[in-house]
Image (cartoon, helix red, strand yellow):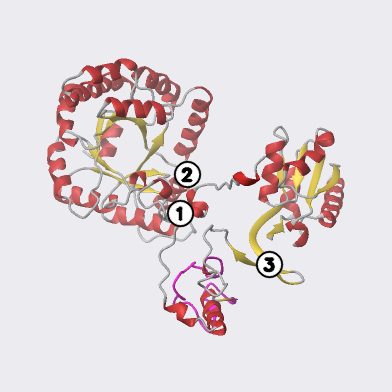
């Protein structure tokens, strides 16, 4: 899933300062799973905003609405009947959702209530961790199912650096060394011979380095 | 006279762009430097231009200055280095006696000859200009004090082909760049003096020297390519006709560029000649332009 963090209340209040009527849009997908921008969080943020603005003597009308997704046009269209009643949209979706809403309602300022952070997994209740950088060329088959791009701080392709100590990364001693994890996993799989292979320098054109990416599936187009 | 002194004097400055080789042999560059000596005020040396891997601007500038006594403009781009490397390169330049900088965004590696490369762009050009400014103030981007602070003459690009709304944005952009300490601007290649005149008038109040780019047109095909693919570029049909009818293409190119320089001279503070392989034609061009 896409994992996000909510922005501070101060930052959000600063963004919506010029507006008296705000449409607060949640999203039922990733940001609901990581408990940042779903219906429950929309309700909590709306209450906070009303409370603080009232305390400042600048009351704000906040309409709460949570879409199934903010990354698909048919759901974004659902707010069209009433979006015109609001001066700005405050979106609790990931950056993709915020931008797509902005594309669809071009005359409305669309403000981000969360910081989009990474593609990750739920480790336990309340703990999420990065697993993928979406580089577009997956080599997990070569590295024991653990990604050196996402899990190694330096995205090294051929083993750990000198900063790996007792299985931990020099960047943060709480963080596992990605390459230690890979080597351990290859051992478990009886595939340590794969570590003898030299992984060639990476083609980054499939990652963000080739410019903004777009995927077209002709077989699915109408 | 240094390039900065030339700019400060208000006299017309002549710069020539000299592309580093793809390899370590600089003998050809030395030959060109001899050719330009006494005729140009500075040699501008691009940094991995068009994302093509080449010898770097730093070593070429250092050698041209040390061995040929040329005034040089060291180029640095954001595409291939993070903020540590960029600041370190600026300190390298200063330590090696290179005072003139031309700072640019740089080209996307995926468009060059190592298209699989990872793009850096840790800073954009505004950030890089800011880094140069802060280093000159005696501290780095992290706020650490420097032991010895550099002194630079800093330039960057402007889009002199901007028109209408884009021109208004360009003026805002120039204001920001000047706020970040820019001492001079290079334009992209100019092909039509009358279009440049409108731009020059619009930005004259900044009183920051503008050096106009002059590219030697090498063929009709090149002219048509530029018109089709380069945003804002407009090579007049009369110029293309002249190239088409000319029996000596190099001579025609020199005369076209020379005529352009004469027309631009009252409108800007200098020109940068971009020979793209026709470096040997530069003296003839300067003769024709009366420089």
Pointers 2 and 1 in contact (C-beta within 8 Å): no
Q: Is residue B248 left or right of residue A191?
A: left
Confirm or deny contact between disc 3 and disc 1 (CB under 8 A). Answer: no
- Expressed as whole percent of the image width and height from the top left, the position of residue B146 reads 40, 60
Q: Which residue is mark 2?
A: B126
Quarter of the figure with residue B106: top left
State the residue in front, B2 or B37. Answer: B37
Q: Residues within 10 Å of mark 2 (few under 14, many from 20)?
A: some
Q: Position of residue A127 (x, y in %)?
A: 72, 70
Which residue in the protein does label 1 denote? B120
For residue B149, side relative to residue B1 (left or right): right
Provide the residue designation for mark 3: A121
Which residue is rendered at x = 32% and y = 26% of the image? B223
Residue B135 circle label: none
Q: Specify the quadrant that holds the N terminus of chain B.
A: top left
Q: Are marks 2 and 1 on the same chain?
A: yes
The answer to which of A83 and A191 lies nearer the viewer is: A191
Q: Is residue A7 above or below residue A198?
A: above
């Amino acid at each position: 899933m896409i994992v996000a963090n909510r922005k501070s209340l101060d930052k959000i209040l600063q963004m919506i300062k010029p507006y008296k009527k705000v449409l607060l849009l949640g999203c039922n997908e990733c940001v609901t799973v990581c408990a940042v921008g779903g219906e429950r969080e929309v309700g909590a943020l709306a209450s906070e905003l009303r409370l603080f603005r009232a305390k400042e003597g600048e009351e704000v009308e906040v309409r709460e609405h949570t879409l199934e997704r903010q990354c698909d046009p048919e759901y974004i269209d659902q707010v069209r009947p009433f979006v015109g009643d609001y001066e700005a949209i405050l979106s609790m979706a990931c950056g993709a959702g915020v931008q797509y809403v902005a594309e669809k309602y071009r005359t409305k300022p669309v403000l981000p209530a969360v910081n989009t952070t990474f593609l990750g997994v739920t480790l336990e209740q309340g703990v999420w961790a990065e697993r993928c950088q979406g580089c577009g060329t997956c080599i997990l088959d070569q590295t024991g199912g653990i990604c050196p791009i996402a899990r190694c701080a330096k995205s090294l392709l051929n083993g750990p650096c000198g900063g790996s100590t007792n299985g931990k990364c020099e960047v943060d001693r709480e963080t596992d060394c990605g390459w230690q994890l890979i080597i351990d996993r290859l051992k478990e799989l009886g595939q340590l011979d794969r570590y003898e292979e030299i992984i060639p320098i990476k083609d980054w054109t499939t990652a963000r380095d080739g410019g903004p990416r777009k995927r077209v599936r002709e077989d699915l187009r109408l | 006279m240094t390039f900065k002194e030339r700019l400060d004097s208000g006299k017309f400055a002549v710069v020539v762009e000299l592309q580093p080789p793809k390899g370590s042999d600089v003998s050809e560059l030395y030959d060109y430097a001899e050719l330009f000596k006494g005729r140009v005020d500075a040699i501008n040396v691009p940094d991995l231009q068009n994302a093509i891997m080449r010898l770097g601007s730093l070593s070429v500038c250092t050698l041209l200055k040390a061995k040929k006594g040329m005034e040089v403009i060291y180029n640095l781009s954001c595409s291939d280095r993070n903020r540590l490397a960029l600041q370190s390169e600026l300190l390298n330049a200063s330590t090696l006696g290179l005072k003139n900088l031309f700072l640019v965004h740089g080209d996307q590696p995926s468009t060059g000859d190592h298209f699989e490369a990872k793009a850096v762009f840790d800073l954009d050009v505004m950030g890089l200009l800011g880094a140069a400014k802060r280093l000159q103030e005696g501290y780095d981007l992290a706020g650490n004090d420097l032991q010895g602070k550099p002194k630079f003459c800093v330039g960057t690009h402007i889009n002199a082909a901007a028109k209408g709304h884009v021109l208004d944005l360009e003026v805002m952009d120039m204001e920001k760049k000047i706020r970040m300490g820019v001492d001079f601007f290079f334009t992209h290649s100019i092909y039509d003096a009358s279009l440049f005149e409108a731009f020059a008038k619009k930005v004259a109040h900044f009183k920051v020297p503008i050096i106009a780019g002059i590219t030697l047109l090498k063929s009709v095909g090149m002219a048509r390519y530029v018109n089709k693919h380069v945003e804002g570029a407009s090579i007049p049909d009369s110029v293309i006709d002249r190239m088409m009818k000319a029996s000596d293409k190099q001579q025609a190119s020199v005369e076209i560029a020379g005529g352009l320089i004469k027309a631009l001279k009252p409108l800007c503070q200098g020109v940068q000649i971009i020979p793209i392989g026709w470096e040997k034609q530069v003296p003839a061009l300067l003769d024709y332009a009366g420089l």
